[in-house]
Amino acid sequence: QVQLVESGGGLVQAGGSLRLSCAASRRTFSNYFMGWLRQAPGKEREFIARISRGGGNTHYTDSVKGRFTISRDNAKNTVYLQMNSLKPEDTAVYYCAARFTDAGNWDYWGQGTQVTVSS
């Protein structure tokens, strides 16, 4: 079992930046593939980005490529999502998630953090 706690959300103007953090409770954090997903009001939860155990491989959904960067610090049991050039359509609750494999369902979820981008 691993507990995930997100932080860093808030209100920002369009074009601004935010950095989300997700702290994991387990020392075996490096065993997990990590990801960020989001859910906007009235929409289904969507995948944003994922990162491999060592951090060397990342993958993004097309809508955030070139604007968002996922990274991790295994020594701090933390994964980050740097979000630049934010748009109103990025408004959503952002969740971090963890899983044992590079594909399939996410095994663990955080509680989410709200990001609101004003126009």
Image (tube, rainbow, N blue to C red):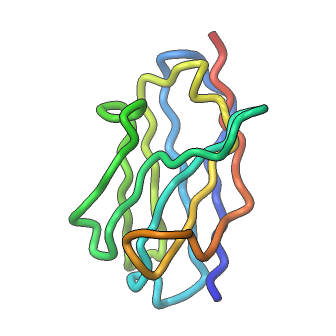
> Of 52 and 116, which appears nearest the observer?
52
Q: In this view, does 95 lie above or below 65?
A: below
Residue under the image location 71 percent in, 35 percent down = 43
Front position in the image: 28 or 103 = 103
Quadrant for residue 21, please give it: bottom right
**Going 63% across and 54% down the picture, which residue do you hit?**
95
Residue 55 against residue 32 in the figure, above or below: above
Q: Nearest the camera: 72 or 65?
A: 65
Of all residues, the one furthest to the right in this rendering is 42
Residue drawn at the location 60% of the way across and 19% of the way down: 88
Q: Quadrant of residue 61?
A: top left
Q: In this view, does 73 lie to the left or right of 115?
A: left
Q: Is residue 63 above or below residue 22?
A: above
How far from the left and from the top, in percent, is residue 78? Answer: 48, 68
Taking the image as shown, residue 90 lies to the left or right of residue 59, namely: right
Identify the image quadrant of the N terminus: bottom right
In percent of width and height, residue 91 lies at: 65, 29
Residue 62 appears at what percent x and percent y? 36, 34
Q: Residue at x 38, y 64 (%)?
A: 72
Q: Is residue 103 above or below residue 85?
A: below
Q: Name the spot of residue 98 as percent of width and height, x first.
A: 53, 72
Q: Check the image and name the residue furthest to the left.
A: 56
